[in-house]
Amino acid sequence: MIEYLPELDKRGIHYYFQVTLNDYEREGFEPNVPALQHRIEVFKKLSDKIGKEKIIWRFDPLVLTDQLTPRHLLAKIYHIGNQLKGYTDKLVFSFIDVKAYRKVQSNLIKETPYFTRENVETAEPVGDRKMELVKGLTKIRDYWAEMGWNLTLATCSEEINLDLYGIEHNRCIDGDLMERIFSEDWELVYYLHTGKLPETSTDMFYSKHMIPPKGKNLKDRGQRKVCGCMISKDIGMYNTCLHFCVYCYANASKNCVLRNVSRHSDSSESIID
């Protein structure tokens, strides 16, 4: 996308990025993504270009195995974060949903040596193992704060309330963030407050010096209850990503993806429906 950003700027199209930057290289959970260090360097390059407030780091989802304990997973996050200091303001994480998605269970069993039908649900952090991750992340965040990096932690579509630990509920499509980083776009800010675009002839608040108070709940009602995203449109298509990440609920199987990809002649990473 980086080479196309000048064109988006020219057209006045706003953007911010959420970049999933995990370290599951040893585990082989993301078989077709580039090498970790390359992904880190691309993240930093993008941040330098657009500003750290417009790029959000996601270590998502958190997956456990017998060998990959909460302590080892926290070490991976710490290692990446030490290289991203000053390049982002936010880290978003979630816990893998194994019980909720049969296709995730199937892919974990078929595509990794760690899981069988009997133990596949142990990939999902629960109970003490979940809280070990939560407490470890807050300790890492607090240490980074002492080093001068004030990083916000947030969960994505998790029911658990972690206010006690200063961990927010994230909104991937975040109206508050857009209002802050695109504040010069008066019509956008007006929409975020009202749910409509201004009409010059009828709207008493049309003056660009006057923004009405927020009065419209723009939550996307088509998403899960715990999802905080505002209304939006997905343009991707399920069962098309060739990264073949084993935890992904958007791919039913490799064969399904390969069949879909074979119907298209381009080499893009996803197919727009």
Image (cartoon, helix red, strand yellow):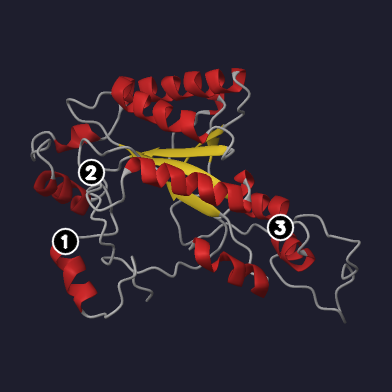
Report the amino acid beneath label 1. Answer: Lys
Do labels 3 and 2 touch, CB within 8 Å?
no
Q: Which residue is mark 1?
A: 254
Residue at 13% x, 65% y: name it: 255
Label 2: how many residues lie within 10 Å, few (<14), some (14-19) or many (20+)?
A: many
Report the amino acid beneath label 2. Answer: Phe
- Give the alpha-carbon distance from disc 3 to disc 2, as whole Å: 36 Å
Q: Residue 152 placed where, x, y %?
A: 57, 33
Mark earlier in primary sequence (3, 2): 2
Residue 120 in the image: above or below residue 132: below
- Give the alpha-carbon distance from disc 1 to disc 3, as whole Å: 39 Å
Q: Residue 218 placed where, x, y %?
A: 62, 59
Residue 250 in the image: above or below residue 123: below
Residue 155 in the image: above or below residue 251: above
Q: Which residue is mark 2?
A: 29
- Give the alpha-carbon distance from disc 1 to disc 2, as whole Å: 14 Å
Say the numbered circle drawn on residue 271. Answer: none
Q: Nearer the viewer, residue 21 or 121?
A: 21
Label 3: how many residues lie within 10 Å, few (<14), some (14-19) or many (20+)?
A: some
Q: Which residue is mark 3?
A: 182
145 sits left or right of 227 in the view = right
Local secondary structure at mark 2: loop
Mark earlier in primary sequence (1, 3): 3
Mark earlier in primary sequence (1, 2): 2
72 sits left or right of 110 in the view = right
Q: Quadrant of residue 205?
A: bottom right
Local secondary structure at mark 3: loop
Q: Quadrant of residue 251?
A: bottom left
Q: Residue 195 placed where, x, y %?
A: 69, 66
